[in-house]
Image (tube, rainbow, N blue to C red):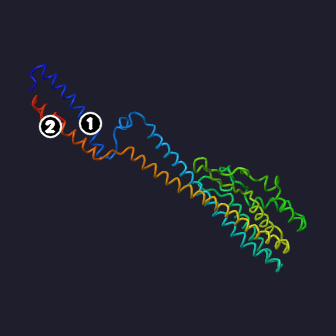
Amino acid sequence: MISASGDLAQYLALRRANTQVSSGFETAAATVAEGKIQNLRETFQSDFRPLNAVQNTLTRIGAYQEAGTQAAFFLEQQQAALGAVGDLATALSQDMVAAQESAATGTLDTISASARSAFEQTVGTLNGAAGGRHLFSGAAVDTAPLPDGSAMLQTLSTEIAGMSHADAAAHIQTFFTDPAGGYAASFAGAESEGVSFTIGDQQSASADLTAMSPALRQALAAMATGALIADADVVGEAGVALLTSAQGIADARGTIGVTQERIETFQARNSAMATSMELRLTEMTTPDMYDAASELEQYEQALERLYLVTSRMASMNFAEFM
């Protein structure tokens, strides 16, 4: 046992040395076990600018990748919606054009019902949302762009009551094409500002198509005409216009496709850059494992030497010493 003050002082000095060596041993052991530098402050000499630069770049790229994913999803949903509207327009246009050759009342009644259904489905599709964003409202993603389809048809039906077929058709056309009134006045979105996603440094992708698209307005006008006017010639002409609008919708899908390809390109670039930065970060925070193992061995030997010295001064086993 310790019997003198001098021995006690020496013992306490050894205990302090043990604390320091034990701490170094634990750090070295963790470095070997985890394969990561434990004391970055010492490694970088308190200058974390290189490390922060890599981490900040990874954070920025991650934000771009997330925005790119959201943009790709949004445009994919727009494509699906436009595909559905285009299919409705194409199928209905064929029946409406055929009505010009068969002016039977039953045929016109059937077309009227089909056109009404197509109109309401189209408006419902244009009012659709995905991921918490309305698809055809422009930047006003929290607002449905259009009123209810059946309500629009009821408004038009009231307005054309008592008009000739030709005047009624002209009124419906004006309702949908007037830049300030009618359909335009009921549009609740942001016509001049699309949905923008930042997908790279000073690079953005925009979804600019809204329910104010001329092709979509033309389609709705033709469908409304078929739904509300029981005249074979008028319905036939509207069918031709509807077929033209279907092509316009297809063209719009092509434009969206170009943006989708651009997003894919930037996503690939961002992924490659992220991989490069992750490798760089790993290099900066991973020790030389041979040196780390050698350091751990040195600490183990130092602990053993301290134990041998200390155990001569006090009755203890190695576990108590640690």
**Quarter of image, res 229:** bottom right
Q: What amino acid is at disc 1? A: Gly
Q: Quadrant of the N terminus?
A: top left
Q: Position of residue 233 (x, y in %)?
A: 85, 74
Q: Classify 280 as above or below 109.
A: above
Q: Which residue is mark 1?
A: 24
**Quarter of image, res 213:** bottom right
- Asked which secondary structure carries label 2, the reply is helix
Q: What amino acid is at disc 2? A: Phe
Q: Position of residue 62 (x, y in %)?
A: 51, 49
Q: Position of residue 254 (x, y in %)?
A: 67, 64
Q: Classify 300 as above or below 215.
A: above
**Left or right of 294, for residue 203:** right
Residue 44, numbered circle: none
Q: Position of residue 98 (x, y in %)?
A: 79, 78
Q: Residues within 10 Å of mark 1 (few under 14, many from 20)?
A: some
- The numbered mark, 2 or 1, whose residue comes first in the sequence reads 1
Q: Are marks 2 and 1 in contact (CB under 8 Å)?
A: no
Q: Quadrant of the C terminus?
A: top left
Residue pictured at 9% horizontal, 31% vertical: 312
Q: Classify 105 as above or below 284.
A: below
C-alpha gap between disc 2 and disc 1: 18 Å
- Asked which secondary structure carries label 1, the reply is helix
Residue pictured at 53% horizontal, 48% vertical: 63
How many numbered discs, if any?
Answer: 2
Q: Which residue is mark 2?
A: 318
**Quarter of image, res 116:** bottom right
